[in-house]
Image (cartoon, grey):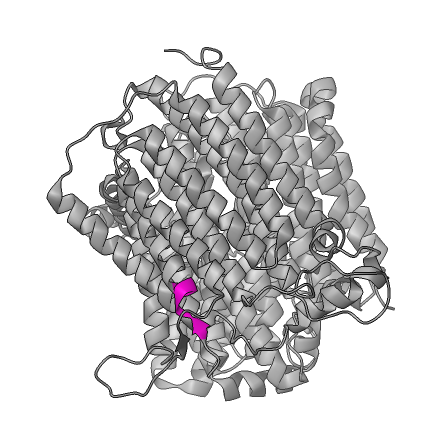
């Protein structure tokens, strides 16, 4: 069954509409806006769910000339991501109602959160690269606003800007990549298109076109940068831990469950198109590196939210690495883990929020034994924390097992250095187990003496993460249900040929099972030494400053700011003559360069023949005389000793030009010019009365310099007329002929110039009138409002 | 041999040079003159792009009557452009002059080099 465009557009558009209505709703509902948002998310979830079982593409025209359209694709992969986003959205909105109780800026918070959800749904369904790019960047913008929720907090501002620069910078890489794909599509389909669905459907032709044009690797690299920036892959992972200054529901929603998965989602989406040895090399390396680095840094974290942030980066690395492997098992790991991670990590973040809310601290060393005060929360943490560690029979185990199988398979096939892949995966998993236990110690470890009495959390703070934990638990007990419901079909969209997905507890010992066992046992075995490991990692990161991307980011930003501060005053020195000099010199210089480069004006000394025929005088004698007087008047203006003399000679120049218009068969221009010159003369004389005469000594050096520049500019203008003016015998241009011939039949007027102005180009004239009106209003304001609205 | 008029080219070039020189002066009023001179030069340049020839009755782009064959006229398009330019130029000059007046009031000097 093909998808219903109207339903998908409604699901994507509804959150945006709701975001527009949020300011009003927030004023009326207050804290309950969260529940209204949850209702919107639930509606979206229901709308998306109606499309379950459908597959295909639907579109409506948008920019036909570029073949960009409102195209949506519905398949298992997009439905999984959309259901996840709207489903976690329900939980996060409902949780926020209590969590954000009494906070400022609720309208902005909920409005942005809604717009974000709409953008994510847009990314999930977009089958058009332009549409995808727009929604992709919208998610970055929403994330910027939400990270900077505490507008007064400097750390929030710093982190928000960092997230913005990294993710939007990655978005620019996406844009270039999209343009490369569109260029290559011309080779595959004959016409350039932005239709991603068509590209994926005819992957063979696209791959051939990309290879042929040499754009395969550049496009792949650009998409990797875009996805890496969005999904916090090494070395662009550093923004994610900083983004934790956002309110905890935002961290749960954007920075664990959805936005950071946009990169992973896109990698899965284009996987069938780009799957190749280069693809595997790139994404497996980046993914495993991120998995390891994230896990190691998570162990060294002292703040529970920071721990979860590094852990998120690590798990995103797992998904990226999974998609990197060429086997279908890799795609199964990526898809299934996207679902599992969203469930357990969103719940863990919300749990972290509860802990911070009740205990007033997120510092691991100050927390412990919380299970007595909050048993339900501790239960949620246990289920989801063990799932994060990849312990059977919790849901995280199955997807991690897929990755182990894919890594082992790749190593067995590749041999040699390829054995590093499963080894790295196991090493990262050891650290994963370690930091998961670390997190659980907050609930089940020894209770620090100075920890005060912990109040039992409000039921609405516990019930929503509880829902997620129950879902995670159900998938853990019966993974076949999830596979049956959606994961199987989602995997099909990311592989070349449909596969049968089997997830379940192992019934016999295989190498991947051994890998899991080693990871868990080693992690548990190393737990007693976690303090020493933490110190070692901490020392290593402190001493090895130059390998920290954050350090580079700060240097780059500081350097840019310092350069800007130095460059600004040089370029913008407040002197009119500097600006005028640069503008006219550059314009004249480039024009001259153009003439020389195209050979319109041969370089002197090359012995070229006469390159332009000139005629003396070439105009009727009367016109030559008028022009000569005009030029003389121009000289007189320049040499005028007083303002009055200058204004009068300027008028002579203007009136001479009016006579020139008469002689050049342009009576309308002459009339206008005469009127305008008269007015200008009057305005000048009126203003001059208020201004003092200006006397200044002529500085010889400066005058000579200005004169040289002026002569150069005049020379270029002279050349331009010689080169560009038509020969007298030349035919009337086609457009001029058109206007003359159509003046009477099309516009019913005999004065062609008038007809052009008021009829053919009527809107241009309207714009001109607007410009003159604005000038008139400005004049009025400048004269009458001197002492209003400003001091001094 | 039909050719381009050197007088026209010379006048356009000369007016551009004079206008540029005026724009670089320190006296703000002279800067405004410079802008006005550059405007005139640009207008003459545009007219020259349409071709300038000995004036005749047919050359004026006002048709004699409704219907019938139309003669070869001077280029009406550049004339329409220049007409717009003249009016806009008026607006620009008037605004620049009032700005000059206001700038003098605020800064007590006409010397653009001394502004803060």
Whether the magenta-drawn stretch holds residue B8 is answered as yes
Q: Which residues are magenta?
A: B4-9
- Quadrant where the N terminus of chain A is found in the figure: bottom right
Q: Is residue A602 above or below residue A651?
A: below
The quarter of the image holding the C terminus of chain A is top left
Tell me what residue is drawn at x 54 percent, y 75 percent.
A728
- Asked which quadrant contains residue A521, the reply is bottom left
What residue appears at the point 67 percent right and 84 percent down from the top-left corner?
A190
Residue extending farthest to the front is A621
- Answer above or below: position of A788 versus A237: above
Depth order, front residue of A55/A614 = A614
Q: In this image, A4 relative to B76: left or right?
A: right
Query: Is residue A582 a member of the stretch shown in magenta?
Result: no
Q: x and y percent of residue A149 in the render?
A: 51, 30
| Residue B47 visible in the picture | yes
Measured from the top left, where is residue A689 in percent x and y? 39, 19
Q: Locate residue B59, reporting x and y percent.
A: 66, 65
Q: Nearer the viewer, residue A724 or A667?
A: A667
């Amino acid at each position: 069954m093909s998808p219903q465009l109207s339903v998908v557009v409604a699901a994507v558009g509804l959150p945006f509409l709701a975001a527009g209505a949020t300011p009003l709703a927030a004023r009326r509902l207050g804290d309950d806006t969260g529940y209204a948002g949850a209702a919107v998310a639930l509606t979206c979830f229901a709308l998306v769910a109606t499309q379950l079982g459908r597959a295909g593409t639907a579109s409506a025209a948008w920019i036909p000339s570029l073949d960009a359209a409102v195209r949506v694709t519905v398949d298992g992969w997009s439905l999984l991501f959309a259901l996840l986003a709207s489903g976690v959205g329900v939980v996060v909105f409902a949780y926020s109602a209590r969590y954000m109780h009494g906070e400022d800026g609720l309208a902005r918070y909920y409005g942005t959160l809604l717009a974000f959800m709409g953008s994510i749904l847009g990314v999930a369904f977009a089958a058009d690269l332009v549409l995808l790019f727009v929604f992709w960047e919208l998610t970055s913008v929403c994330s910027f606003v939400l990270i900077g929720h505490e507008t007064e907090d400097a750390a929030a501002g710093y982190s928000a800007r960092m997230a913005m620069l990294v993710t939007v910078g990655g978005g620019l890489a996406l844009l270039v990549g999209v343009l490369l794909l569109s260029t290559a599509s011309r080779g595959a389909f004959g016409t350039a298109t932005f239709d991603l669905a068509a590209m994926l459907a005819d992957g063979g032709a696209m791959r051939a076109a990309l290879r042929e044009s040499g754009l395969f690797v550049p496009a792949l690299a650009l998409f990797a940068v875009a996805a890496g920036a969005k999904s916090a892959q090494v070395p662009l992972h550093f923004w994610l831990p900083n983004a934790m200054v956002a309110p905890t529901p935002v961290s749960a929603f954007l920075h664990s469950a959805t936005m950071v998965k946009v990169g992973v989602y896109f990698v899965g989406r284009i996987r069938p198109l780009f799957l190749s040895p280069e693809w595997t090399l790139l994404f497996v390396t980046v993914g495993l590196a991120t998995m390891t680095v994230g896990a190691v840094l998570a162990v060294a974290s002292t703040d529970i939210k920071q721990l979860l942030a590094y852990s998120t980066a690590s798990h995103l690395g797992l998904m990226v690495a999974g998609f990197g492997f060429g086997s279908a098992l890799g795609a199964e790991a990526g898809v299934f883990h996207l679902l599992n991670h969203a469930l357990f990590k969103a719940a863990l973040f919300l749990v972290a929020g509860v802990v911070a809310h009740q205990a007033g601290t997120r510092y691991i060393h100050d927390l412990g034994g919380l299970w007595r005060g909050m048993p339900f929360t501790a239960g949620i943490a246990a289920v989801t924390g063990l799932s994060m560690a990849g312990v059977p029979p919790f849901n995280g185990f199955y997807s991690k097992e897929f990755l182990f199988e894919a890594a082992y398979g790749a190593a067995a096939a590749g041999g040699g250095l390829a054995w590093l892949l499963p080894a790295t995966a196991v090493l990262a998993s050891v650290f994963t187990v370690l930091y998961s236990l670390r997190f659980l110690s907050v609930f089940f470890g020894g209770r620090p003496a100075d920890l005060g009495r912990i109040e039992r959390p409000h039921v609405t703070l516990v019930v929503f993460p509880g829902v997620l934990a129950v879902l995670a638990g159900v998938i853990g007990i019966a993974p076949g249900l999830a596979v049956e419901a959606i994961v199987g079909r989602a995997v099909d969209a990311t592989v070349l040929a449909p596969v049968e997905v089997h997830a379940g507890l192992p019934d016999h010992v295989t190498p991947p099972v051994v890998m899991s066992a080693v990871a868990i046992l080693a992690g548990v075995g190393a737990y007693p030494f976690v303090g020493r490991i933490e110190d070692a990692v901490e020392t290593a990161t402190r001493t090895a400053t130059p390998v920290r991307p954050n350090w580079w980011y700060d240097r780059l930003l500081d350097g840019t700011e310092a350069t800007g501060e130095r460059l600004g005053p040089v370029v913008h020195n407040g002197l009119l003559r500097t600006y005028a000099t640069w503008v006219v010199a550059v314009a004249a210089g480039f024009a001259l360069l153009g003439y020389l480069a195209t050979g319109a004006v041969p370089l002197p000394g090359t012995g070229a023949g006469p390159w332009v025929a000139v005629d003396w005088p070439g105009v009727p004698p009367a016109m030559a005389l008028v022009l000569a007087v005009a030029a003389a008047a121009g000289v007189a203006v320049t040499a005028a000793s007083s303002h009055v003399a200058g204004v009068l000679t300027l008028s002579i120049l203007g009136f001479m030009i009016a006579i020139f218009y008469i002689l050049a068969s342009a009576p309308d221009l002459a009339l206008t010019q005469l009127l305008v010159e008269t007015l200008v003369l009057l305005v000048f004389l009126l203003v001059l009365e208020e201004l003092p005469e200006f006397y200044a000594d002529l500085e010889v050096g400066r005058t000579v310099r200005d004169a040289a520049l002026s002569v150069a500019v005049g020379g270029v203008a002279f050349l331009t007329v010689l080169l560009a003016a038509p020969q007298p015998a030349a035919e009337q241009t086609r457009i001029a002929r058109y206007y003359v011939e159509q003046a009477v039949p099309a516009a019913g007027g005999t004065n062609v110039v008038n007809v052009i102005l008021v009829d053919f180009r009527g809107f241009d004239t309207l714009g001109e009138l607007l410009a003159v009106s604005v000038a008139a209003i400005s004049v009025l304001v400048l004269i009458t409002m001197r002492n209003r609205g400003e001091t001094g | 041999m039909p050719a381009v008029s050197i007088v026209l080219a010379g006048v356009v070039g000369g007016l551009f040079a004079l206008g540029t020189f005026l724009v670089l002066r320190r006296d703000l009023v002279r800067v405004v003159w410079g802008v006005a001179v550059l405007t005139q030069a640009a207008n003459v340049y545009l007219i020259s792009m349409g071709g300038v020839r000995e004036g005749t009755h047919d050359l004026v782009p006002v048709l004699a009557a409704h219907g019938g064959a139309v003669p070869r006229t001077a280029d009406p398009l550049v004339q329409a452009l220049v007409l717009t330019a003249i009016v806009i130029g008026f607006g620009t000059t008037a605004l620049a002059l009032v700005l000059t007046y206001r700038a003098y009031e605020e800064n007590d000097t006409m010397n653009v080099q001394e502004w803060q």
